[in-house]
Image (cartoon, rainbow, N blue to C red):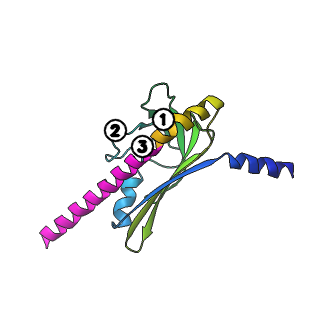
Amino acid sequence: MLFNKQTSKAKSTEQINHHFFFVEVPVELVGPEAAVWGEGTWWPQKSLTNFERISEGELGVGTRFKIKITKPMTPPMVVEVTKFVPNRFLEFTFKSGIFKGGQEVITIGERANGTRVDYELHYRVRGILNQILWSLLSHKQYEANITLVMDALREHVLRLYREKQEKQLEGA
């Protein structure tokens, strides 16, 4: 019984941030673009996070990235791909940095008239000082950054889709 209480207490400190968008673009076009999270040409230059692949090979389970935060005095984080379904699902697990455990999850889902992209951050902040900094400064910056990233991806796939439609019309 004590184990269950500790488990529920530990889970209560986990936070979840969720962002999503929907576009009337086929999943076959959106999936490959979203699946290169952090590495795609669409990733905003002004993003507060820069991904650097630190392992070899194609993207898949076991691929590791160093995420550098462009703010001073912010240590980098290391994440590893722990679940991967090509063009549909990508889960990064935090191995080091401000977060204790936790995951970043990108889900690309087909809908009747388009595609929905969901981003979730499941996390617990490591240490008292990090908790204070996160709640006072970093959380708001993170929210703005994820909005920037999601908007960039949405605009990118919409542009690709418009270009594809224009080429089809020219060829007809």
**Three-letter residue code for mark 2:** Lys
Crowd around label 3: few <14 · some 14–19 · many ≥20 (10 Å) = some
* Residue to which mark 2 is pinned: 46
Crowd around label 2: few <14 · some 14–19 · many ≥20 (10 Å) = few
Residue occupying the far front of the picture: 136
Q: Which mark is residue 145?
A: 3
N-terminal label among 1 and 2: 2
Position in image of residue 168 (x %, y %): 18, 69
Q: CA distance from mark 1 to mark 2?
A: 18 Å
Crowd around label 1: few <14 · some 14–19 · many ≥20 (10 Å) = many
N-terminal label among 1 and 3: 1
* Residue to which mark 1 is pinned: 66
Q: Identify the image quadrant of the C terminus.
A: bottom left
Position in image of residue 112 (x %, y %): 41, 74
| Left or right, residue 40 beside residue 14 | left
Q: Secondary structure at mark 3?
A: helix
| Nearer to me, 126 or 101 | 126
Foreground: disc 1 or disc 3: 3
Residue range in magenta is 143-172
Q: Secondary structure at mark 2?
A: loop
**Three-letter residue code for mark 3:** Asn
Is residue 54 visible in this depiction of the protein?
no
Is residue 74 visible in this depiction of the protein?
yes
| Nearer to me, 16 or 38 | 16
| Left or right, residue 136 beside residue 12 | left
N-terminal label among 2 and 3: 2
Position in image of residue 17 (x %, y %): 54, 50
> Residue at horizontal 31%, vertical 57%?
157
> Residue at horizontal 40%, vertical 54%?
34
Residue 154 on the magenta span:
yes
